[in-house]
């Protein structure tokens, strides 16, 4: 995801692709003011934003040649809100969300569907130390495939994500100081 020459080689070899899933991601659990925050932000941006950007640029022409296809970008609930120990991750996922929105509009004419997947913690190694409820990867996959089949451009993979998205327009600013535990309680 972070090496343009590897991405180019993959695109040159895989000319029959009709579905690109940008799922690689890292979370270094760093706030913005920590000693290593700049380095963490750079690493997360390289993987979480520039990776999908480079992959999408490389594979968009291939998708067009193959009838349009689809790009799926796995984002995060933290695309919309930030928690103290994940500021740099949130910034990278917010950038990836902006990229997803542009790709959706920019690739529309070539018939490429672009799906943004927002989720709270998914039961993977990345979220292994989180104590919040986690959605199973297989449930996310089912929702993504259903969204592609239905022509939808967004997947809100779990109840916490749906609650946070609904709260974004709340005039009281309830999610400005986002507390995942409170969001889970509110979702119940």
Image (tube, rainbow, N blue to C red):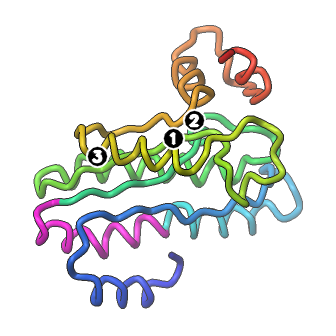
Q: Which residue is mark 1?
A: 118
**Residue 69, relative to residue 46: is it above or below?**
above
Circle 3 Cα neighbour tier, 10 Å, few/some/many (<14 / 14–19 / ≥20)? many
**Element assignment for label 1:** strand
| Residue 59 position within the rendered picture, expressed as x and y whole percent measured from the top left | 28, 72
Q: Residue at the far top: name it.
A: 172
- Sequence order check, earlier mark of 2 and 1: 2
Question: Do labels 2 and 1 touch, CB within 8 Å?
Answer: yes
**Element assignment for label 2:** loop
| Residue 162 position within the rendered picture, expressed as x and y whole percent measured from the top left | 53, 25
Residue bounds of the magenta highlight: 51-68
Label total for image: 3
Q: Nearer the viewer, residue 32 or 166?
A: 166
Res 167 quadrant in image: top right
| Residue 19 position within the rendered picture, expressed as x and y whole percent measured from the top left | 29, 63
Q: Nearer the viewer, residue 56 or 181?
A: 181
- Sequence order check, earlier mark of 3 and 2: 2
Q: Which residue is mark 3?
A: 148
Q: CA distance from mark 3 to mark 2?
A: 23 Å
Q: Which mark is residue 80?
A: 2
In this rendering, position of residue 132 left or right of residue 55: right
Which residue occupies 74% across, 64% down? 40
Which residue occupies 20% across, 67% down? 63
């Amino acid at each position: 995801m972070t090496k343009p020459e590897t991405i180019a080689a993959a695109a040159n070899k895989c000319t029959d692709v009709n579905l690109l899933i940008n799922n690689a991601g890292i979370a270094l659990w760093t706030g913005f003011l920590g000693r290593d925050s700049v380095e963490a932000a750079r690493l997360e941006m390289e993987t979480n934003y520039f990776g999908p950007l480079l992959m999408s640029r490389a594979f968009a022409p291939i998708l067009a040649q193959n009838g349009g296809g689809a790009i799926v970008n796995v984002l995060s609930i933290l695309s919309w809100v930030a928690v103290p120990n994940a500021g740099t991750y949130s910034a990278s996922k917010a950038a990836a969300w902006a990229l997803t929105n542009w790709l959706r509009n920019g690739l529309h004419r070539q018939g490429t569907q672009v799906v943004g997947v927002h989720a709270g913690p998914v039961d993977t190694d990345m979220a292994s130390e989180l104590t919040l409820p986690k959605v199973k990867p297989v449930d996310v996959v089912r929702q993504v495939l259903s969204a592609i089949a239905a022509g939808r451009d967004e997947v809100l993979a779990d109840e916490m994500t749906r609650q946070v998205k609904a709260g974004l327009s709340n005039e009281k600013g309830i999610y400005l100081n986002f507390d995942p535990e409170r969001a889970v309680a509110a979702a119940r």
